[in-house]
């Protein structure tokens, strides 16, 4: 504007809040309300006896007022200036009128319907000590101390996932007063959402419909939180499948595959031809749940789909069924490429990769174009062996066991490609025998067995073994190779770690401490140990809490840092033990000694009268 400051009760140009009184006062004292020569846009002052000016017929828009204020009234005069008003004052008056109009000119809306009551949660209430513990865990949002050094205090937020898993295992209901904090925590950490929403129960969806910040709960719930029809209600199921949104249909199909896989498959087949390609792919992926030989005819039909991704997914599902026709076709192709060579001094495996990828192979899911840096023939061979049933190889290779097969030499440098394909087949078919053979001994010098070529593949093979065997193998690996390469392998072990694995981890940490290195070199393993070690290991760890005598070649202060790290580990394990006790249901009260288990029945008056 031109520098005229806006006034409150009395403006800088001498005008008071009352327009009539101010003009009268100005006329009596002889002072003009403003200098008209200072602004050529200003209209002449009105006479004291003139009536109050009437507002313009057409009010300026809010956008025009804002533009004029930004440019300044000395560069752009406000529209519809009331005669006798300075340009800045007229602009402020117009803005005040527009503000009142915008605030008071709204039509009152209809009162919103009051939300219904929250649904009941039939699960048992959380014990009071556990509820207090949850409140403390949710209040600790710091996520640990800032920086690399965490001190000796446990990270409470990292214990929340384990607490939620234990609470869900007991089937407790979440305390209503803690639901907002629980949803806020799940909003900030996606890894918490499945367990947090399962613990929060139906009331989480009720709250999510009232607060946009918690809408993730609706997206995570089947069908966006909508109630799914009973599978026995055929009409409701059909109507939702034909008229529902994609999320509702996907949730319905997933629920049907859990309870009645055949009904879900038939429902998908009824509209398969009219579905979009991306929807067909998502729906087809849901058939992994409850996959059986009964799904083979539908999956065989999907092999002819016009979408390459749909064909590949159908082929992958069929290859997971060892008795399927596709698995048999792949077995014939793979057997033609791999055979036993007896011409040398010792038996070996001879490999002849396919010369072409024909249309039949592509229909069965073989991708013709290899990725960059891969040869075509080796690319095709790997796909054929991966999709072939592992049960064909003992008969094809002289009746040998999987351990004996993977120990055979492979001619012409094909061993890496052949064993990698067998690894993928063992993971896909979840074959424990082949996984065990391909892993080899954990103490082998190559630390991976004859078939594994990376830690990621070894971790996948371990997942096919039962938890006890998995823990023993990883413990042997740590005892031989230490903790530097064991992080991925520890991640697939069952929680809490079995005693052999826990002892191996503690022993390896003790060895690392004696070596004089800093503990944060093993921060990842220490973090896993805090969450996965059996709390009973706290007794063994108490002997490591003292600061050891530092060696001459040790890092400065390393002993104190290790004592601090072990103190945090022991404190966390004790806290986990307390959490387990708090979540355990209270034991029934035992009667005092000498009290009969069933007190004698007190006869009723009617019985006494009858006697």
Image: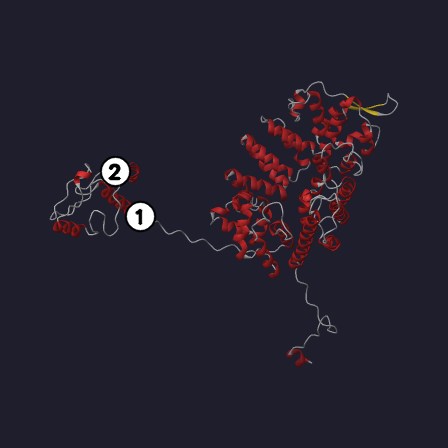
Could you say which is closer to the camera, residue 151 or residue 387? Answer: 151
Q: Is residue 94 visible in this depiction of the protein?
A: yes
| Relative depth, front residue between 205 and 79 | 79
| Residue depth check, mark 1 versus mark 2: number of the one nearer the observer | 2
Mark nearer the N terminus (1 vs 2):
2
Quarter of the picture holding the N terminus: top left
Residue 103, numbered circle: 1
Quadrant of res 517: top right
- Percent from the top left, x then y, of residue 33? 17, 46
Q: Secondary structure at mark 2?
A: loop
Task: Establish if 292 lies above or below 27.
Answer: above
Q: Quadrant of residue 580?
A: bottom right
Q: Which residue is mark 2?
A: 73
Instruction: Give the left or right position of residue 86, taking residue 326 as reference.
Output: left
Q: Residues within 10 Å of mark 1 (few under 14, many from 20)?
A: few
Residue at the image position 74 percent from the left and 31 percent from the top? 422
Of 95 and 335, which appears nearest the observer?
A: 95
Count of marks, rendered view: 2
Instruction: Pick the quarter of the image with the C terminus.
Output: bottom right
User: Which of the 4 image quadrants contains residue 578?
Assistant: bottom right
């Amino acid at each position: 504007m031109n520098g005229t400051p806006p006034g409150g009760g009395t403006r800088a140009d001498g005008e008071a809040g009352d327009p009539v009184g101010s003009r009268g006062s100005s006329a009596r004292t002889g002072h003009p309300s403003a200098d008209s020569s200072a602004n050529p846009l200003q209209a002449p002052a009105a006479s004291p006896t003139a009536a109050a000016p009437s507002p313009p017929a057409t009010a300026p828009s809010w956008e025009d007022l804002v533009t004029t204020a930004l440019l300044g009234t000395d560069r752009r005069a406000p529209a519809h200036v009331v005669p006798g008003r300075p340009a800045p004052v007229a602009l402020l008056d117009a803005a005040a009128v527009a503000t009142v109009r915008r605030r008071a000119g709204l039509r009152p809306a209809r009162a919103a319907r009051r939300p219904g009551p929250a649904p009941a949660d039939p699960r048992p209430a959380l014990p009071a000590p556990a509820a207090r513990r949850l409140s403390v865990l949710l209040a600790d949002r710091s996520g640990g101390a800032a920086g690399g050094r965490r001190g000796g205090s446990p990270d409470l937020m990292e214990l929340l996932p384990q607490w939620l898993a234990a609470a869900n295992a007991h089937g407790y209901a979440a305390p209503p007063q803690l639901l907002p904090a629980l949803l806020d925590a799940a909003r900030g950490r996606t890894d918490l959402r499945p367990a947090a929403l399962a613990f929060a129960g139906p009331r989480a969806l009720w709250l999510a419909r009232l607060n946009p910040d918690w809408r993730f709960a609706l997206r995570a719930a089947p069908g966006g939180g909508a109630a799914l029809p009973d599978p026995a209600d055929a009409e409701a199921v059909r109507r939702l499948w034909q008229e529902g949104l994609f999320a509702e249909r996907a949730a319905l199909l997933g629920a049907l595959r859990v309870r009645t896989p055949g009904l879900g498959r038939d429902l998908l087949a009824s509209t398969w031809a009219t579905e979009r390609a991306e929807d067909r792919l998502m729906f087809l992926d849901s058939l992994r749940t409850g996959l059986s030989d009964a799904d083979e005819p539908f999956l065989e039909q999907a092999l002819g789909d016009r979408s390459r991704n749909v064909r590949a997914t159908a082929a992958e599902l069929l290859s997971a069924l060892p008795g399927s026709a596709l698995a048999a076709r792949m077995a014939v192709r793979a057997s033609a490429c791999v055979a036993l060579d007896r011409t040398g001094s010792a038996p070996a495996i001879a490999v002849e990769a396919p010369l072409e990828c024909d249309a039949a192979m592509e229909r069965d899911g073989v991708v013709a174009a290899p990725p960059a840096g891969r040869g075509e023939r080796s690319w095709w061979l790997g796909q054929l062996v991966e999709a072939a049933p592992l049960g064909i190889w003992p008969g094809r290779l002289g009746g040998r066991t999987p351990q004996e097969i993977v120990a055979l030499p492979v001619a012409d440098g094909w061993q890496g490609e052949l064993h990698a394909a067998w690894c993928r087949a063992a993971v896909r078919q979840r074959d424990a025998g082949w996984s065990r053979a391909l892993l080899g001994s954990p103490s082998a010098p190559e630390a991976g067995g004859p078939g594994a070529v990376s830690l990621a593949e070894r971790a996948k093979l371990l997942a096919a073994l039962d938890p006890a065997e998995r823990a023993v193998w990883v413990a042997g690996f740590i005892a031989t190779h230490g903790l530097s390469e064991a992080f991925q392998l520890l991640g697939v072990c069952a929680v809490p770690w079995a005693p052999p694995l826990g002892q191996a981890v503690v022993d390896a940490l003790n060895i690392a401490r004696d070596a004089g290195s800093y503990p944060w070199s093993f921060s990842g393993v220490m973090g896993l140990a805090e969450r996965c070690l059996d709390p009973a290991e706290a007794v063994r760890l108490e002997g490591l809490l003292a600061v050891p005598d530092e060696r001459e070649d040790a890092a400065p202060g390393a002993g104190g840092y290790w004592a601090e790290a072990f103190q945090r580990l022991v404190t966390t394990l004790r806290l986990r033990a307390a959490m387990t006790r708090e979540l355990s249901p209270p034991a029934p009260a035992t009667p005092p000694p000498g009290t009969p288990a069933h007190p004698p029945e007190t006869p009723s008056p009617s019985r006494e009268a009858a006697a």
